[in-house]
């Protein structure tokens, strides 16, 4: 099948999922065309099955906001015609589903009928999409998609609660490529990150409010009062400065490393003992799954789709949003005893295996077949 994948090319989970899915589909013989404004960060290799087409939005002074949707839908039309693309798969409703639908309609004018699959990722529904400014357009473009998928049951329920949706929503969870794990890194040693008796705790996100970054710091602060530990903070975003300031106030700057965005996630997680994800809401929590497949137990909030990934008392623990005391206590339960930690590490890895890409990609292929029958 020739498939166009539209996504955000950045470090965010939706872009990562779209890229990994495209690469997996390409390895199964499909021809994949990524169409977005920059080469996706996890897209290292282009080959005869994987193409990247950049959407250019020239700056024009008249426009206060440059019309990306227009440029994207025009690019989609051109690429569908040039490469004989048979299906559009758009990740993140805003504005991709809207632009995809416009492209579909323009192509219909020329007698080309092409199905569109929309995958909902989370903030496109729970935070941004349900805002009154966007809601009518998001509702419209979800309802006009030929097939709609969501990355968790929780996100499906949120979508049905927040929007007036007439379509079925198929739940297809996010995934990891289990065949790549456990990884070995001979060129990098744990000692480069922390001392022998020091526990390594990690948080990875886009440092937005929804991630409750201050909770991460407060949980770590409690942990380090009971044992020698280091916190590695990976990512960039608006809450980063506040977090750095909080570390200063708490007097723990020497124990917290802010690494910025990184392409070395697996390397960092490989040497980690615990992952913190105390988010306000999280439709899935891909970062938690990436931690788990690296054998890192997860301390998280019990919200959104996280309980579908992190199994309480097995791969880690779940607490109410904002309950930093409980999260710190759970963290210490795991970290204090080496044998308990090792059990949780093994269990986290095992729980992640359920989300192996080999099991998940066929669901997308089935959805594509279904989409063809609806145009
Ligand atoms: O977490 C973010 O803010 C980024 C966002 C995105 O669109 O990349 O993540 C969402 O999609 C991920 C991939 O499906 C999910 O794993 C995240 O849970 C979800 N984020 C939220 O729901 C807050």
Image: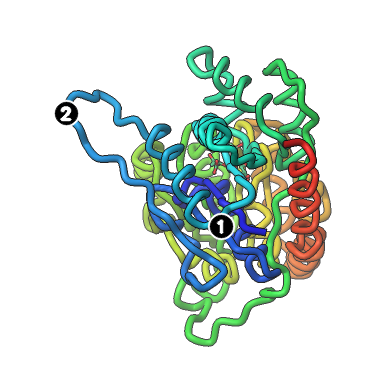
Comparing 296 with 61, the one in front is 61
**Residue in the image at 24% along x and 23% along y:** 64
**Residue in the image at 49% along x and 63% along y:** 51
> In x, y percent, where is residue 76?
48, 44
Q: Is residue 344 visible?
A: no
**Residue in the image at 38% along x and 38% along y:** 71
Q: In the visual, does 232 lie left or right of 59? A: right
Comparing 17 with 46, the one in front is 46
The residues bearing labels 1 and 2 have C-alpha atoms spaced at a distance of 33 Å
Few, some or many residues within 10 Å of mark 2 (<14, 14–19, 20+): few
Image quadrant occupied by the N terminus: bottom right
Q: Is residue 208 visible?
A: yes
Residue 255's tag is none
Q: Secondary structure at mark 1?
A: helix
Outermost residue toward the bottom? Answer: 186
Few, some or many residues within 10 Å of mark 1 (<14, 14–19, 20+): many
Outermost residue toward the top? Answer: 132
Residue 61's tag is 2
Ligand 1, seen in the image, is in the quarter at top right
Q: In the visual, does 44 lie left or right of 105? A: left
Residue that label 1 marks: 19
Of circles 1 and 2, which is in front? Answer: 2
**With respect to residue 239, does 252 lie above or below?**
below
> In x, y percent, where is residue 292?
70, 60
> In x, y percent, where is residue 329?
69, 45
Give the color scheme: rainbow, by chain, secondary structure or one colour: rainbow
């Amino acid at each position: 099948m020739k498939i166009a994948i539209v996504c955000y090319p950045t470090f965010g989970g939706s872009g990562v999922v779209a890229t990994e899915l495209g690469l997996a589909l390409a390895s199964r013989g499909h021809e994949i065309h990524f169409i977005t404004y920059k080469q996706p960060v996890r897209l290292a290799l282009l080959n005869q099955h994987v193409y990247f087409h950049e959407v250019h939005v020239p700056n024009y002074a008249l426009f206060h906001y440059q019309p990306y949707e227009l440029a994207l839908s025009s690019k989609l039309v051109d690429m569908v015609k040039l490469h004989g693309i048979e299906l559009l798969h758009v990740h993140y409703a805003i504005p991709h589903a809207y632009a995809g639908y416009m492209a579909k309609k323009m192509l219909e004018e020329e007698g080309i009928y092409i199905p569109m699959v929309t995958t909902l990722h989370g903030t496109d529904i729970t935070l941004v999409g349900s805002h009154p400014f966007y809601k009518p357009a998001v509702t419209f473009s979800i309802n006009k998609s030929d097939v709609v998928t969501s990355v968790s049951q929780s996100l499906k329920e949120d979508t049905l609660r927040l929007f007036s949706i007439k379509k079925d929503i198929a739940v297809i969870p996010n995934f990891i490529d289990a065949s790549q794990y456990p990884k070995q890194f001979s060129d990098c040693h744990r000692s480069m990150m922390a001392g022998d008796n020091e526990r390594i705790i990690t948080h990875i996100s886009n440092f937005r409010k929804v991630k409750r970054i201050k909770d991460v710091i407060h949980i770590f602060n409690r942990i380090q009062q009971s044992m020698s530990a280091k916190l590695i903070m990976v990512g960039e975003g608006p809450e980063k400065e506040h977090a750095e300031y909080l570390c200063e106030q708490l007097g723990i700057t020497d124990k917290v490393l802010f690494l910025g965005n990184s392409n070395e996630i697996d390397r960092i997680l490989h040497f980690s003992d615990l992952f913190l994800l105390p988010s306000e809401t999280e439709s899935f929590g891909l970062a938690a799954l990436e931690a788990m497949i690296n054998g890192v137990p997860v301390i998280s909030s019990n919200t959104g789709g996280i309980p579908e990934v992190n199994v309480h008392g097995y791969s880690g623990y779940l607490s109410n949003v904002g309950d930093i005391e409980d999260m710190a206590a759970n963290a210490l339960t795991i970290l204090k005893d080496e044998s308990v930690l090792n059990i949780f590490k093994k269990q986290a890895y095992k729980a992640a295996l359920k989300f192996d890409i080999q099991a998940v990609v066929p669901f997308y292929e089935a959805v594509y077949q279904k989409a063809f029958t609806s145009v």
